[in-house]
Amino acid sequence: MNSRKHKFSNRIVNEQKSNIWEEILQLSGKYGALNLALGFPDFAPPKHIRNALENVANQQNHMIHHYTRTLGHPRLVKVLAKIYSRELQQTLDPMKNVVTTIGAYEAMYAAFQALVNPGDEVILLEPCYEPYKVVAGLAGAIVRYVPLIPKEGSNESDDWKFDINNLKAAFNEKTKAIVVNNPMNPLGKVFTREELQEIADLCVQYDVLCFSDEVYEWLIYGKRQHIRMATLNGMAERTITMGSAGKTFSVTGWKIGWAIGPAHLISAMHLFHHLAVRGTPSVLQEALAIAFETEETRIGNPDCYFSLLSKQMEQKRNELSTYLNDAGLVPITPGGGYFIVADISSIDTEDGVNPNIQEAYDSQFVKWAIKEKKLTLIPLSIFYSEEHKHYGDKFVRVCFAKGFPDFAPPKHVVQALEQVASYSDHMIHHYTRASGHLRLCKVLARLYSQLLKRDINPMTDVLTTTGAYDALFTTFQALICPGDEVILIEPCYEPYMELARLAGASVKYVPLIPKQDSRSSDDWVFDLQTLQEAFSAKTKAIVVNTPMNPLGKVFNRDELQAIADLCVEHDSLCFADEVYQWLVYGEKRKHIHIASLDGMAERTINIGSAGKTFSVTGWKTGWAVGPSHLMDALQSFHHLTIRGGSSVLQEAVAIALEKEEQLLGSRECYFYQLSNDMQNRRDRLVKYLQEADLNPVLPGGGYFIVADISKLDSNINKDESAREAFDIKFVKWAIVEKKFTVIPLSIFYSKEHQYLGEKYIRICFAKRLLLLLLLRGEGLLRRGEKGLLLRGEPDL
């Protein structure tokens, strides 16, 4: 589509140009070449980690399938703190010094976003993992490159060294951070203590942070030792150490990483991670914690998986080196990691490579090898900046984390996860397609083709994400430019305001006004004139949440049509948050997909959630569905920042959706049964609230009831001149005096409209009513040992 407002956001437009990675992988697929380019193993993870996942899937405590602590599952951060306290020679607080992330890639992205400002300088050692340049660019950093220079005639990665004068020249007062990848991708170099000390001394001298990417920390070969940057003098207080479950346990598809560092730095990452992703799958974190607990007692012993894996990989390295030598390529022996760099300059390509054209020699060689030899490699020059590309253009990178031959395979929702955990095909534990696991994208495309009444292409129109929150974050970042205007309808899910602010948008708020003495969310309506005035030539998008959090309002067709008409008139996008789409109550209410209205298909992003669909909030699997010209931007941004979701959980969700797809519209469908069950819970809670003198506003859908607290005798000062809103004071009183936790409605409003919500609270009814402690009698409670934590996750 040609619309100005449908263009990519400025922050990613420069990254959207065609790149050699895409070209190589497309060629590889076209010619059916053996892929030795990408860095993931094709062998099975250790049996005990597969068993751990299967055991978690079978746990009787179903709460493991729901949200866990946003900043890291307690069991996992505790064992990580225990292991790294020993490794880093310091005492770590699991709650303050650790954050778990969507793979180590998100840890690096979060570090840059949380700690680097536009205009700050960052140092990268080359050849460097190519995405470092991307995350630096997204943060607005200026990059200084320091190349490692190979020793003439040497075939060892140890002999690729930086020039100390070049390194010193790269540091200055503007330097915010240096990235140290050890062992190094792509070279496999393991830095010596002396080399790291030179870097550390400069970091201390210039007060510079160190982002220490140590994902290959356990893959060290020969007599080399892995020296941790944070253990050197002066570095503990300035180093973020990053790790990866994928590389540690050979489960790249689990997409679990972590960052460990001083509290004053990790707190910044905590904040950004909370704003951008809001947590990591609980089931995978639990399984990983169990696996780490098994290994924690073995570290340093021959039976530790880390030791066994290192020996196995060293043997693979040696075997591949032999094959490369026999083929006429000269391998540079790596000291660690997954990769070998090989010199291709002596290979006769029979005129397949022309040294006289502008394209780098190694890039031409790789394309020739794919077409003529059916072998996929990666040119080393792409790991360099433009000024230093010449250092890499006679080398290729080869991954040796593969079997020779391939290893023999080893041995409904929760059942689906159990089934996936016990798959004989171990490849499900490794990376899947970055834009979405193919099986899941296909079933989502079929489902939404039916719901939206148009053909959905699973490859171009669907993106799977780490929860619906990540889908929202990605949508804002990919499509909203600083200065664009975004419309929010209030009361709105509070993170919308944060996401708009992070994207640099200006927000126009349109409140829903309740009818006098109304007791139904249907009667909270927007004033059409106010909505019309909110739209302008600057309006890039409106967010429509139906059913609505916190109110539970289900927008009717007329209301959605009024919004749609204005979107078409002003050429505005619509971000349709429909995570509660299956939770609509009463025979007369229908969930209307705004994308199905005239003129909206080409401008609407539909956002959904496995957590709300299947009551598995802890799986953190969401999706976005929309037209390809918009989804291209989302897929690009997601690739730049998260690089895919968990393959095992996406496979399980796909299996579950395939089952429901056959039952859709019948009484056997889980969506129908869940809606009925939740409606019963709603109706029972309404009764209890009425008996407790809280006047509920009956929701038409979703998890929540809004209740009027103005008639309760709580002895709270209602002085309107007081700075704190009445509902906030009430909630604090209820927690302290009645051991009862609810949410004040005013936080779901902008400052100018906060008064509309301050006589209400939000309560979640996706709970067993025994746990709701029976609201009745004088005050709020009569019995119950614990207060409620009504965050919105079900206890189904």
Image: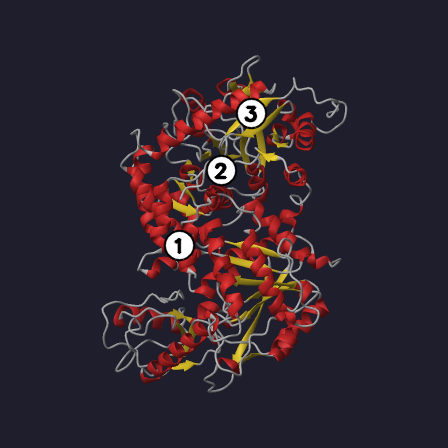
Among numbered discs 2 and 3, the one appearing first in the sequence? 2
Residue 341, label in figure: 3
The residue identified by callout 1 is: 418
Position of residue 430 relative to residue 662, above or below, is above
Position of residue 3 relative to residue 268, above or below, is below
Please state the horizontal and vertical placement of residue 662, each as a whole percent of the image: 53, 67
Q: How is the image coloured?
A: secondary structure
Q: Secondary structure at mark 3?
A: strand
Q: Is residue 48 left or right of residue 181?
A: left
Among numbered discs 1 and 3, the one appearing first in the sequence? 3
Q: Secondary structure at mark 1?
A: helix
Task: Residue type at mark 1: give it.
Answer: Glu
The residue identified by callout 2 is: 42
Task: Residue type at mark 2: give it.
Answer: Asp
Q: CA distance from mark 1 to mark 3?
A: 39 Å
Q: Are marks 2 and 3 in contact (CB under 8 Å)?
A: no
Please state the horizontal and vertical placement of residue 294, each as a whole percent of the image: 30, 41
Q: CA distance from mark 2 to mark 3?
A: 19 Å
Please state the horizontal and vertical placement of residue 360, each as a whole percent of the image: 69, 27
**Which corner quadrant of the image does residue 474 belong to?**
bottom right
Q: Quadrant of the N terminus?
A: bottom right
Q: Secondary structure at mark 2?
A: loop
Q: Quadrant of the C terminus?
A: bottom left
Residue drawn at 70 percent across, 23 percent down? 349
Q: Nearer the viewer, residue 463 or 25?
A: 25
Quick one: label 1, few (<14), some, or many (20+) residues within 10 Å? Answer: many
Q: Is residue 430 left or right of residue 9?
A: left
